[in-house]
Image (cartoon, rainbow, N blue to C red):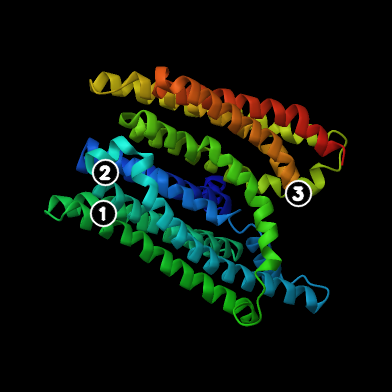
Amino acid sequence: MKGLTSLLASNELASIATRLALGAFPIVFLLVVRWTLGKQAFDLAAAALNWATYLNILMLSGFVLVPPAVARLRLATYVVDTSRDDDCRVLRDHLVLGRWLLALGVLATAFLVATIERTFATLAAEDGAALRFWFLLFAMFALSQIPMTFWLGVAQATGRYRLAFALTALPRAGALVLLPAASAIGIGWGVATALSLTSVFVGQLFLGAAARRALHNIDARILVGPTDVRSVLFSNLNAGFVSLVGSLVSIVPVTLVGRLVPSQVGAAQVIVGISNAFGAVVASGYFPLSLTLSQRLLDQGGVARYCLGIVRGAGLLTLIALLFVAAAGGICACLADTCQPAVLWTAALVLAGAGLRLGALGTQHIALYQGRPHLSLLSATAEGTVALSILLATLPTLELYALGVALLVGGGLRFVVALAVERRWLVER
């Protein structure tokens, strides 16, 4: 009982739960739209969400330099004061970087809203005005994630994992309740959706205020002083480029489905969203393990053991996820005639591909630890290139199934390249 209580109160569990809330919200929100507003709104919203997700690229690497700097400032383990001054400046520079990214995001939004109807021509012919409106709502949501990512990293680095979880999860739960409730009392779908997403924005404002106070309490110089965004831009671009390549197996495939098989864009968005959420949860669960690399890599064969250990763990978690999908599909088939085999099989294939991709997580951890994140580019690029090639070749005939086949083969290729090639590079340092 004591062990269970300790687990439930752990920072690791709070971190995983926060990541799950972030990853699951867009998926569940789309499903609430399907239940509340119908199939047409579901497909329009899914296409708009996918188009708005391209704005997430502006988050670069998710401000990876922020949590370590906050942790060092909090623990005050400096030998000289200049190192503390450097970390204060790093945080100030990231604050300004976030503002520049928001400004750039407004320009990107203007470009995307001007091109969305040509990208999803069939859906735009059904209701172009609604498609644009959905996009603008989701674009505002996507841009709000830029400062939210910064403040979430600060909150967790100061040890406020449970506060971060509460201010992340509860407003999103409120948004999922507000949409059907507002629609039920006769409020128009546009206003109802805007009210729903406002709950998320309010939660993020409270999170930012709490994190800002925490920074001020650690060192008031963090928020006041000279800045130079260029000093942190390159580091973020370097780590963020791997994430950009990763969009080839997350955002781009759904865009292709929406363009070539528009009637399946909603299902594709949900399936890929579930896969991404699953990957984020597994990655956050292994994050504490990655902090032990300084000891693990000292032993001979440490790289291989670490990588294979994550392969086994990721494989087991993927198997559990596949069994859950199979059980859910069986229950759905027994209870309703509307369950579509194509959706269930595609979900299983995409999850299997995600499991293979997660099998390469060990090599990514070590590459980041060694300060060489670019070593993961070979496997990521190979996965994205092959997956998109297969998808484009088979989508007209296999339709939704093509998504599953493409991401499965792509994930398998990434696994092989990471373990066979990139692992050797990591050892040869």
What's the CA distance linking mark 2 and mark 1? Answer: 9 Å
Chain-order first, disc 3 or disc 1: 1
Q: Are marks 2 and 1 in contact (CB under 8 Å)?
A: yes
List the single residue furthest toward the left: 186
Task: Name the element at disc 2.
Answer: helix
What's the CA distance linking mark 3 and mark 1? Answer: 42 Å
- Residue 205 lies, in percent from the top left, at 42, 68
What's the CA distance linking mark 2 and mark 3? Answer: 42 Å
Which mark, by number, is residue 193? 1
- Residue 1 lies, in percent from the top left, at 52, 45
The quarter of the displayed image where residue 256 is located: top left
- Residue 364 lies, in percent from the top left, at 69, 41
Q: Residue at x 56, y 53 (%)?
A: 10
Which mark, by number, is residue 33? 2
Which mark, by number, is residue 369? 3
Q: Residue at x 64, y 48 (%)?
A: 241
